[in-house]
Amino acid sequence: MSSAVGAAPPRHAATPPTPEPAHRQRSYRLGRWDIKYSPYLYIAPFFILFGIFGLFPVLYTVYVSLFEYDLLSDTKEFIGLENYRVVLADTQFWNAAYNTVGMFVVSTVPQLVVALMIANLLNRQMRGRTLFRMGIVIPNITSVAAVGIIFALIFADRYGLVNWLLGTVGIDPIAWRDNRYASWFAIAFMVDWRWTGYNALIYLGAMQAIPKDLYESAALDGASTWRQFWKITVPLIRPTILFTIIISTIGGLQLFTEPLMYGYGLIRGGAQNEFQTLAMYIYERTFTGNFEYGSGAAMSWLLFLMIIIFAVINFVLVRRSVKGEQK
């Protein structure tokens, strides 16, 4: 009988992998499709509605701006870029642009700075902070027309509250509607009162996402509260600050209701157009007076380009400041 010592053990054939059931493969495939394509389905309703009710009017405005279009007679004559040339040579258009940019700067810069300070205060441990957080957004839910009427009375030339307060300390009354820069200040005060709390809540939400460990480590290193704010809070919420700057730019360059209500409903924005904005001038040229639909469309697109330019400038400045700090 031969010895089996040293002989190789018998080899068994490799067991082939058990194929997954067909229903499990389908579930896996559907799961991948869900992860990959479902976000597009969720946001599709907005873009569909925007394409129907938003994109078409925008493109149609480009078309109308190339015509001499009279709304009263409904006559159109193709004139190319003539409307843009006429608008750019219009001194009242540049006056409205100057007013718009001026009020935008006067209102937006203090608004965002004050909102940042308020958000920093509300982010601390304090009594009744939930009540304060709810309170600062109350002006934003108030009707714009009501706000405009109230502030128009507060800044009234003869019997306004502000002039009365100035008179109590020996300061002569200010002609709030006859002085360009005084009217800018009054309208900016109105805009800031309404939107500062809204921006503060946005900043507060961003601050709540910052890890508390960073502040604790900075406090152990001896950093003051003010230094923690500028070295930790502000750099980490810069994307949110950029968002509010762009949104404020879009809203600030389209001011219409506030100056209209401030001027008691007069579309000219004062006797000498002291506070007439571009949006008001577009409305005046398009729907009052000569009903120049083509000129109004051209001005609308120039305003759109102005908003894009300011938004891009703000974006580049913030991005450059972030990269400079990272270096």
Image (cartoon, grey):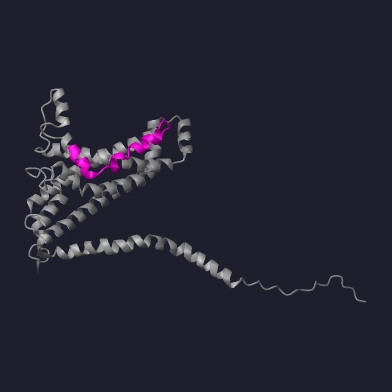
* Residue extent of the magenta highlight: 123-151
Q: Quadrant of residue 192?
A: top left
**How many labels were placed on the picture?**
0
Q: Residue at x 48, y 66 (%)?
A: 33
Residue 78, visible in the rendered structure = no
Residue 201, visible in the rendered structure = yes
Q: Residue at x 22, y 52 (%)?
A: 307
Q: Residue at x 27, y 42 (%)?
A: 142
Counting from the top left corner in percent of width and height, residue 221 is at 46, 31
Query: In the shown orientation, is residue 155 left or right of residue 199?
Result: left
- Of residue 285 and residue 324, the one placed in the foreground of this image is 285
Counting from the top left corner in percent of width and height, residue 319 is at 33, 48
Counting from the top left corner in percent of width and height, residue 246 is at 28, 49
- Of residue 147 and residue 11, the one placed in the foreground of this image is 147
Q: Quadrant of the C terminus?
A: top left
Above or below: residue 327 compared with residue 158: below
Q: Quadrant of residue 17?
A: bottom right
Q: Quadrant of the N terminus?
A: bottom right
Q: Quadrant of residue 264?
A: top left
Counting from the top left corner in percent of width and height, residue 82 is at 9, 63
Residue 143 lies in magenta, yes or no?
yes
- Residue closest to the far right: 1
- Of residue 64 and residue 266, the one placed in the foreground of this image is 266
Q: Residue at x 40, y 36 (%)?
A: 130
Residue 203 lies in magenta, yes or no?
no
Q: Main secondary structure of the magenta part?
A: helix
- Residue closest to the far bottom: 1
Query: In the shown orientation, is residue 204 left or right of residue 211?
Result: left
